[in-house]
Image (spheres, rainbow, N blue to C red):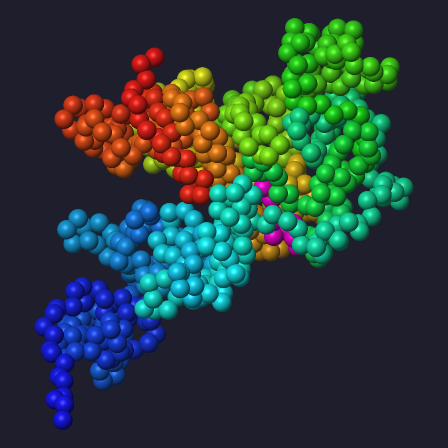
């Protein structure tokens, strides 16, 4: 007979048993557990472990932290220390929960995350840390996953019976396990979209299946499509949506014209970027006999074609916005509408929705009209052409502008052959442009006096070759021609909003709102800009706006401009769509909506529909329904903005791959304990110099100075310092740029 084996008793103490038991009971607060069930969850079954659990349960019961609901079965005591919030994951596995119940975010240690992922809506238990007395939390339940689809690189196991997907980015600290029969036959190293199906309690990784193969990691289209997929943004239209759009009647008919104000004979033109493919706004200009100017802001009547309840409208609503990546536009509407029927192209009649104003020489509104129109665009100008007219006629008086065509410089090259009619139209458009510029400047000046903030942040643009390779970088700045269009679009948006908001009884509308800046963020900005010798005034609402404008003006052309512009924008609250009108702080408007870009923004479509509804005398729409739509639009705008930023970052890294042997002068744009961020002055590409790679000393992070300080030689690398760097690594797949630090720039 063989001798029966006995399990050797364990005397090992179970670590962190109090928190572990509480976590188990809190996670399933509606269930009760006995010591055996808890032991099973801890994967222990020896007598010593069971005794420890029994003893701990008795202690927790005595402290009223748990209750015994029936003999030997325990539940968590529910109290007010449970809260809900959004989990913001950090790189090292820990994170914070953003919770409305607390002024500050609640820190969550990595062992208390309990399978929450970035962006998840979670329930948490909040307590004070014993030593520091600071609030800390433990996630006890996941209320709603932020997303279930992820983009990453698939790694096939050697034995080919399973795979893991390594998720892009640094917010996800776990891979996703995929059985081999759920890989869609993806090859090792492919970029894929994987959906998370479940996460077994004792498993380190969730289980998933591949739902789309994007291509080989590192290839251009793969990486662009992966940026879109990461945010759940489509890059093509479903066949049924394209078919529906292609079968819409696009004809301009006498029957429909009869329902509209006919403005086809008014001088009308567009001013847009040179490479624009869709023109959703146009201006008309007429001098009236009473000395006023009738100025029409004409917007593509997208709602005429986009009928509610259709697959086309459903798709537009889901997208909510066009997405502008570096090398392409992912439109909200199919091309037959966005670049065709709804594009106010020259020499074509179009259905439009218009805001028409009678304005005097002081840029004061004397009359206004809103409604559906039919228009004819006489000319298309690029911003550069309109700017040349403004620059070349800067010394003309208003009388010269309106009465003496011979003095107007239309900047038409001598070699260009124009008919008399085309020449006359060009001169008339030039006259209109000069008067509109004069009025726009008066409106802008008034807006600034009222407390508007002037964010003219430099935009990075890439010159691409035929294969979308970046061969150059240039910067887009806003000039008078851009500001002319901006002011009249702002006017239409403001006056439409004001018109509806003053209706009696009150009507539901879609507003674009912007709350006042957070005081703590302003103080943090002050701490940074003080390093460059700038000050802010927090004493009043107007004082904040005035000093921010002064700051933005003072840094123009200086090394710290892009840094300060970026930080100033971050102090602002996020603009959003809502039915609750709280005004727009940044523009200094009490009433503001989005009305002028329905080709690329769904909220503008909603504004058109609601405005027409109220012009027709119908009752107010449901605030609840439209608030839900506003939230969706705000969220999709946020995702689109993140995708656009990621595409710029990706293209910057591609650009820097071809410049690895060059030295660049950059500005330190951020300092952390793991390194410094450097933004190259000549191209705005930002990368990191890791602390461990600076070899001439042992550097430590000084939070008060926003600096890395050498322990032995006391050399300081501080926010705003100019330094010389070279490219260490340009990783397209991880979208990360690392620099070598050569030293401070002595220039």
Query: Percent x, y for residue 442?
Result: 61, 19
Which residues, given as a range, are shown in magenta? 314-323
Q: Position of residue 546 (x, y in %)?
A: 44, 23
431 left or right of 24?
Answer: right
Q: Nearer the viewer, residue 312 or 173?
A: 173
Figure check: 290 above or below 276 = above
Say which of 727 and 251 sits in front. 727
Which residue is painted at 43% across and 49% down in the image? Answer: 168
Q: Is residue 665 visible?
A: yes
- Residue drawn at x 27%, y 73% is 41
Q: Nearer the viewer, residue 233 or 128?
A: 233
Which quadrant, please, contains the C terminus? top left
Q: Does 322 appear in magenta?
A: yes
Dominant secondary structure (helix, strand or loop) of the stretch shown in magenta: helix
Tag count:
0
The quarter of the picture where the N terminus appears is: bottom left
The residue under the point 56% across, 20% down is 445
Give the side of residue 522 with respect to residue 241, left or right.
Answer: left
Please tell me whether residue 549 belongs to the stretch shown in magenta.
no
Task: Say if 662 sits above or below 224 in the image.
Answer: above
Q: Residue at x 21, y 74 (%)?
A: 44
Furthest-bottom residue in view?
A: 1
| Side of 161 relative to 216 (left or right) | left
- The image shows residue 182, relative to residue 649, as above or below, that is below
Point out residue 675 in the picture as x, y percentages from the top left corner: 29, 34
């Amino acid at each position: 007979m063989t001798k029966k084996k006995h399990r050797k008793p364990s005397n090992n103490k179970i670590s962190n048993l109090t928190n572990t038991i509480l976590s188990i009971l809190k996670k399933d607060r509606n269930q009760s557990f006995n010591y055996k069930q808890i032991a099973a969850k801890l994967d222990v079954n020896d007598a010593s472990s069971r005794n420890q659990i029994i003893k701990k349960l008795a202690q927790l019961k005595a402290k009223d932290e748990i209750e015994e609901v029936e003999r030997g079965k325990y539940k968590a005591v529910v109290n007010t220390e449970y809260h809900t919030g959004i989990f913001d994951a950090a790189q090292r596995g820990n994170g914070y929960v953003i919770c409305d119940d607390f002024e500050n975010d609640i820190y969550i240690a990595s062992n208390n995350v309990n399978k929450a992922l970035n962006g998840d809506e979670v329930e948490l238990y909040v307590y004070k840390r014993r030593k520091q007395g600071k609030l800390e939390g433990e996630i006890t339940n996941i209320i709603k996953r932020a997303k279930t689809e992820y983009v990453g690189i698939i790694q096939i196991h050697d034995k080919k019976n399973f795979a893991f997907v390594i998720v892009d980015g640094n917010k996800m600290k776990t891979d996703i396990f995929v059985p081999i029969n759920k890989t869609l036959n993806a090859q090792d190293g492919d970029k894929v979209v994987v959906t998370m199906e479940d996460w077994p309690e004792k498993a380190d990784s969730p289980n998933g299946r591949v739902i789309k193969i994007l291509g080989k990691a590192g290839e251009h289209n793969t990486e662009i499509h992966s940026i879109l997929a990461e945010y759940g943004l489509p890059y093509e239209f479903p066949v049924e949506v394209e078919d529906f759009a292609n079968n819409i009647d696009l004809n301009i008919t006498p029957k429909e014209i009869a329902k509209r104000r006919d403005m086809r004979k008014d001088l009308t033109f567009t001013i847009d970027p040179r490479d624009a493919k869709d023109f959703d706004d146009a201006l008309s200009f007429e001098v009236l006999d009473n000395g006023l100017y009738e100025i029409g802001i004409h917007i593509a009547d997208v709602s005429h074609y986009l009928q509610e309840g259709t697959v086309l409208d459903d798709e537009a609503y889901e997208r909510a916005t066009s997405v502008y990546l570096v090398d392409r536009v992912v439109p909200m509407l199919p091309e037959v509408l966005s670049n065709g029927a709804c594009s106010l192209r020259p020499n074509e009649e179009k259905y439009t929705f218009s805001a028409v104003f009678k304005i005097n020489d002081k840029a004061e509104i004397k009359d206004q009209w809103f409604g559906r129109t039919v228009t004819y665009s006489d000319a298309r100008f690029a911003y550069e052409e309109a700017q040349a007219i403004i620059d070349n006629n800067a010394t003309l008086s208003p009388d010269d502008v309106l009465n003496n065509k011979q003095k107007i410089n239309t900047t038409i090259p001598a070699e260009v052959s124009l008919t008399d009619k085309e020449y006359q139209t060009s001169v008339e458009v030039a006259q209109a442009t000069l008067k509109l510029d004069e009025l726009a400047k008066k409106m802008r000046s008034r807006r600034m006096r009222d407390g508007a903030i002037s964010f003219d942040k430099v935009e990075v643009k890439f010159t691409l070759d035929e294969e979308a390779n970046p061969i150059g970088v240039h910067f887009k700045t806003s000039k008078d021609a851009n500001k002319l269009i901006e002011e009249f679009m702002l006017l239409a948006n403001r006056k439409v909003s004001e018109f509806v908001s003053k209706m009696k009884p009150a009507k539901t509308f879609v507003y674009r709102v912007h709350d006042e800046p957070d005081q703590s963020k302003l103080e943090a900005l002050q701490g940074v800009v003080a390093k460059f010798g700038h000050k802010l005034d927090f004493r009043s609402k107007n004082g904040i706006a005035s000093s921010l404008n002064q700051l933005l003006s003072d840094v123009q052309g200086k090394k710290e401009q892009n840094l300060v512009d970026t930080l100033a924008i971050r102090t602002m609250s996020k603009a959003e769509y809502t039915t609750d009108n709280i005004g727009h702080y940044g523009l200094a408007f009490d009433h503001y909506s989005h009305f002028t870009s329905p080709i690329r923004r769904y909220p503008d479509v909603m504004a058109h529909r609601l405005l027409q509804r109220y012009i027709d005398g119908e009752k107010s729409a449901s605030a609840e329904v439209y608030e839900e739509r506003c939230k969706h639009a705000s969220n999709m705008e946020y995702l689109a903005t993140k995708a656009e930023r990621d595409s710029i970052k990706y293209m910057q890294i591609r650009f820097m791959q071809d410049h690895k042997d060059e030295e660049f002068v950059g500005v330190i744009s951020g300092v952390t304990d793991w390194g410094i961020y450097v933004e190259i002055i000549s191209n705005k590409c930002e990368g990191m110099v890791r602390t461990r790679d600076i070899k001439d000393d042992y550097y430590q992070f000084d939070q008060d100075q926003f600096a890395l300080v050498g322990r032995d030689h006391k050399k300081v690398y501080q926010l705003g310092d100019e330094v010389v760097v070279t490219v260490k690594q340009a990783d397209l797949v991880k979208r990360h740029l690392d620099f070598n630090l050569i030293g401070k720039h002595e220039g």
